[in-house]
Amino acid sequence: MKLYWSLTSPYVRKVMACAITREIDGRITLVPTNPHLSTPDLLTDNPLSKVPTLLTDDGLALFDSPVICEYLDSLGDAPPMFPPSGAARWRALKLQAMGDGILDAAVGRRMEQAKPEEAARTAWMERQQAAIGRALAMLETDLPGHAADIGSLSIGCALGYLDFRFAAEPWRDACPALAAWFAGFSATPGLMRTIPKDAS
């Protein structure tokens, strides 16, 4: 398999955390990619010019982290990250959507930070920040589980991105229970081995 990959993308981190959890990361060739440059190879496999994009062994191009993670969950012999049915499945998918929503808001804010300040842009950024705050407040009263399923991994990657890109906006004081959960869950191999190290 081939993964179009960016070192600091939290969506790529989520995919790699899943691959490590499934113990299949050794089957993936990483292709360093800057999606903003829209290279011909990336555009051939993903017209949206986004990472992560996974090219399977059968030549199928998959994109968007939820799709890639579910595909990876179909490989290997490790316990599934996506519960097969029932309440556990819906809760895991809900937490994945919440983690991805936090990332969408945080990544959007980061992309806008370097632009000139204007009223509409400022209001949009404040709306994204408020959405993140509400999501964290909900998680504080309804913590993810300790098993490395798709929901908990998604939340872990989202919290890691807040630490990485918005360290000047600490969230732990308002969410001590969530902070304690994250401190323990961060030792999960999928998160421990994918900590972003380049702040560019």
Image (cartoon, grey):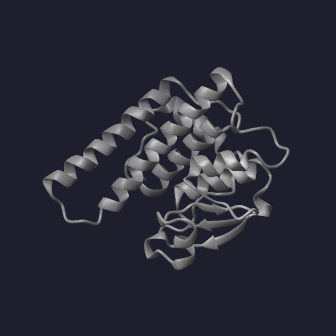
Give the residue furthest to the top. Answer: 87
Where residue 152 sits in the image (x, y, percent)?
62, 37
Residue sitting at x 20%, y 47%: 123
Residue 65 is left or right of residue 134, and the answer is: right
Residue sitting at x 60%, y 66%: 5
Residue 138 is left or right of residue 21, and the answer is: left
Where residue 84 sits in the image (x, y, percent)?
72, 30
Where residue 193 sits in the image (x, y, percent)?
69, 57
Where residue 125 sits in the image (x, y, percent)?
27, 49
Residue sitting at x 67%, y 51%: 17
Residue 192 is left or right of residue 43, and the answer is: right
Q: Is residue 197 above or below residue 94?
A: below
Residue 183 is left or right of residue 71, and the answer is: left
Q: Is residue 42 visible?
A: yes
Give the residue furthest to the right. Answer: 77
Q: Quadrant of the N terminus?
A: bottom right
Q: Is residue 174 visible?
A: no
Q: Is residue 61 above or below residue 158?
A: below
**Quarter of the figure with residue 198:** bottom right
Q: Is residue 142 above or below residue 147?
A: above
**Quarter of the figure with residue 55:** bottom right
Give the residue furthest to the bottom. Answer: 40
Q: What is the number of callouts on the image?
A: 0
